Image (tube, helix red, strand yellow):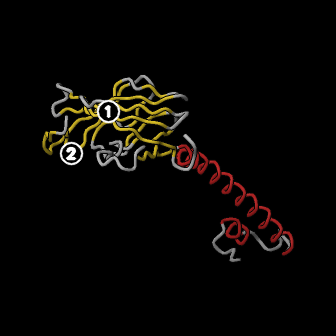
Amino acid sequence: MIFNDQPIFIELCALKPLVYSGQMTLQKIFNDMDFKIMKRAILLAVLALPITDVVASTQLIACEPASKNDSSATGIWPVPYLTQNKLCFNMKAQAGNTCVKNGHTTTWFTEAVIVTVDGESMGRDDTWFRVARPTINEREIEYTIEASRDKKQWISMSRVSINRISGQAVDWLIREHGGTSYNCHLEGKKL
């Protein structure tokens, strides 16, 4: 172990040799180093805890079609996930926030998105998305995704309902009868 770059070693080398014997100098170096290493370890642990909590609390809601033969089941879009008691959507947002708390509203802006309503493409353009007052609790997650090109006129794209106890979900594209059924679970854990 090299001590030359340690501040305590430089400090001790500057002192007169008559003040400390060799044994006391080494003992002081090791005592100070242990304290500094311990302070650094505690600081790193304190800084790392919030990061691991956020990572551990982020859980993707993975959904598969209830019927493996259903060719219309393309998946719930945008893909939802849960983090810190909020419902979030796996989309790149140039503005706004893709996460929302129970009963609140969020709006976000995404560039160059193809919006489809009732199976009809509205074209590729910059689009605002909104989720207004979703229900997020231990029994269910329900929300409606809306889209707008001007933030004035909003079009409902789909309504999603997920039973968190059974894992059953339905994604109703607007004006669709019956919706598409999915079986969902939290990635790595039971929903």
Residue displayed at 19% across by 32% down: 148
* Left or right of residue 28: residue 185: left
Give 13 or 167, whichever is nearer the viewer.
167
Residue displayed at 69% across by 74% down: 3
**Image spot of residue 161 (x, y percent):** 41, 31
* Left or right of residue 109: residue 52: right
Quadrant where the image shows the C terminus: top right
Residue displayed at 63% across by 72% down: 5
Occupied quadrant, residue 13 = bottom right
Give 92 or 62, whichever is nearer the viewer.
62
Q: Which residue is the site of mark 2?
A: 113
**What crowding class fits label 2: few (fewer than 14 Cα within 10 Å), some (14-19), or many (20 or more)?**
some
Q: Which residue is the site of mark 1?
A: 172
Asked whether the residues under the numbered discs 1 and 2 touch, taking CB atoms below 8 Å apart as contact, a structural biologist would say: no
Q: Taking 35 as reference, is 5 above or below it?
A: below
Question: SS at mark 1?
Answer: strand
- Look at label 1 and name its amino acid: Trp
| Label drawn at residue 112 | none
**What crowding class fits label 1: few (fewer than 14 Cα within 10 Å), some (14-19), or many (20 or more)?**
some
**Image spot of residue 77 (x, y percent):** 33, 42
Q: CA distance from mark 1 to mark 2?
A: 20 Å
Give 12 or 91, whichever is nearer the viewer.
91
Question: SS at mark 2?
Answer: strand
**Image spot of residue 120 (x, y percent):** 15, 39
Give 14 or 59, whichever is nearer the viewer.
59
* Left or right of residue 14: residue 108: left
Q: Residue furthest front?
A: 69
- Look at label 2 and name its amino acid: Val
Looking at the image, is mark 1 or mark 2 earlier in the sequence? 2
**Image spot of residue 149 (x, y percent):** 16, 34
Occupied quadrant, residue 89 = top left
